[in-house]
Amino acid sequence: MAPYDQETEQTMKRFYDTLSEKDRRRYAGIAALKYGPGGRSYIARVLGCSRRTVSKGAREVSQLSGAEVDRRIRHPGAGRKGYQEHWPDIDDPFLQVLQDHTAGDPMDEAVRWTD
């Protein structure tokens, strides 16, 4: 396979530099496997890492199981809590304020709007 053009090599290096150590190894491994024969040395030179790192990444990628791929990074339940947890009694005061600013279609009770 012919070497990548200069722009592609620079893009690969910039992306590589944004990754964590584990992801760098695996990215280098995938790129080397995709490149084919001579890929490990070539990718190591392009990304500025050792051939050993590329080989280890290729081995890790080859040994990935489905369970590792499906594993979540974020913990279940993490993130912003719902407003009901912060203000459990907010619905009644909100509806009271909204009541004076709500109108509807007298012919269709399902249609409502606020001003």
Image (tube, rainbow, N blue to C red):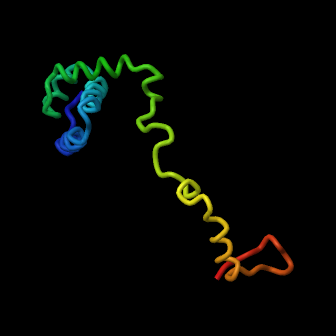
Q: Is residue 52 left or right of residue 27?
A: left
In the image, what residue occupies the spot 80% across and 80% down? 105
Q: Nearer the viewer, residue 112 or 95?
A: 95
Query: Residue 43 location in percent, x, y?
Result: 19, 29
Vertical placement of 81 versus 37: above or below? Answer: below
Query: In the rendered image, which quarter is residue 99 located in?
Result: bottom right
Query: In the rendered image, which quarter is residue 96 located in?
Result: bottom right
- Residue found farthest to the right: 107
Q: Nearer the viewer, residue 76 or 3?
A: 76
Q: Nearer the viewer, residue 36 or 55?
A: 55
Query: Residue 10 location in percent, x, y?
Result: 18, 43
Vertical placement of 21 versus 59: above or below? Answer: below
Q: How many marks?
A: 0
In the image, what residue occupies the spot 14% across and 24% down? 50
Q: Is residue 22 left or right of residue 92?
A: left
Vertical placement of 69 versus 98: above or below? Answer: above
In the image, what residue occupies the spot 37% across and 16% down? 63
Q: Nearer the viewer, residue 54 or 99?
A: 99
Query: Residue 73 location in percent, x, y?
Result: 41, 35
Quadrant showing the C terminus: bottom right
- Residue found farthest to the front: 89
Quadrant showing the N terminus: top left
Query: In the rendered image, which quarter is residue 57 located in?
Result: top left
